[in-house]
Image (cartoon, rainbow, N blue to C red):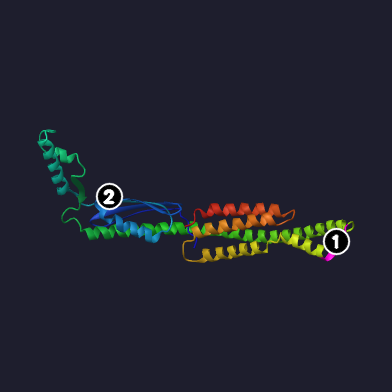
Amino acid sequence: MIKSMTGFASLGRDDESAAVGVTIRSVNHRFLDLQLRVPSALADLEARLRAIVQARLARGRVDLSVSLQLRQAPVPDVQLNAPFVEALSAAVSEARAGGLIEGGLTAGDLLRLPQALAIRERLADGATTPDTLAALVTRAVEDALDALESMRTREGDHLRGDLSGRREALACLVGDIVEAADAGRRGLEARLMERARDVASTLPIDQALLAQEVVRVAQRSDITEEVTRFRGHLEHWEALTRGSEPCGRKLDFLLQEMNREVNTIGSKADGLQVSELIIQAKAELERMREQVQNVE
């Protein structure tokens, strides 16, 4: 299935306890690169939101931002890291006993050390339950992902149309290459036979063996195997684009294989038109490669 990696969605959801805003952007990337920004009051939800996005999207650089406005202001929650403070106090006492410092550990010292105190926001008592807020945020993120997927699917339809047309153009070009290569091989055989007859008129040469050698030399330009593999890649391409799974990376690999076959055909085939047709085929493959970079 062809879906674009480019998309955007922004929406809000609210109830009597809070208003939630979600903005999500995605662009092309080799893998899934998720950048998630949530308020500190929703820090406990970050792992769940990340899992939701990873289950829905396969590739792309995704920026997801969640904003939260509570109907009742959040309450600051200060937590003391008691083990750290005890260890710090013991170290200060030891330094004071050794005459290295004077005085004891003060509140100001703790405020300057981020390891000593953890300051976060929590919901005010009676404002709303964490489960209710989590459900609201989760629903908003899922709705935003639905909107993003719709946009990526529409963009994918445009990509599918363009790539399908280029695939058909490649199939026609390969047919033209085969015809030009066959004509080139026949011309090569004719030139070799004519040259052989000139040599045979002055030297005693077995004509049957000479003819076999001419055919063997001409067969070196046979491209049947490469053409068969190339057409197989085109059929595989069609199967991937009609499937339900993300196929961008597989399509990129197929393009590499098709480009390899075209290079081999160009090095083996003989004929005046072959080189021009090979250039056209490689140009078409490059245009397809550029488009596939944005396929999920």
* Image coordinates for residue 191, horizontal then vertical, percent: 81, 57
Q: Is residue 220 magenta?
A: no
- Residue, disc 1: 205
Q: Is residue 73 visible?
A: no
- Residue 188 seen in the figure: yes
Image quarter for residue 53?
bottom left
**Rendered image quadrant of residue 254:** bottom right
Along the line of sight, the residue nearer the viewer: 126 or 57: 57
Q: Nearer the viewer, mark 2 or mark 1?
A: 1
The question of residue 204 being in magenta is answered with yes
**In the visual, does 170 lie left or right of 160?**
right
* Tag 1 secondary structure: loop
Amino acid type at image mark 1: Ile
Secondary structure mostly seen in magenta is loop
Q: Residues within 10 Å of mark 1 (few under 14, many from 20)?
A: few
Residue 142: image location, x then y, percent: 35, 59
User: Pointer 2 and pointer 1: residues touching (CB < 8 Å)?
Assistant: no
Q: Nearer the viewer, residue 34 or 271?
A: 271
Q: Nearer the viewer, residue 37 or 149?
A: 37
Q: Amino acid at mark 2?
A: Pro
Q: Is residue 149 or residue 105 the one in the foreground?
A: 105
| Residue beneath the point at 58% across and 52% down | 287
Residue highlighted by disc 2: 39
**What is the x, y in percent for residue 168?**
62, 61
Left or right for 104, reference 250: left
Could you tell me which secondary element the residue under label 2 belongs to? loop
Residue projecting furthest to the right: 201
Position in image of residue 28 (x %, y %): 46, 52
Q: Is residue 221 above or below residue 84?
A: below
Magenta-highlighted residues = 203-208
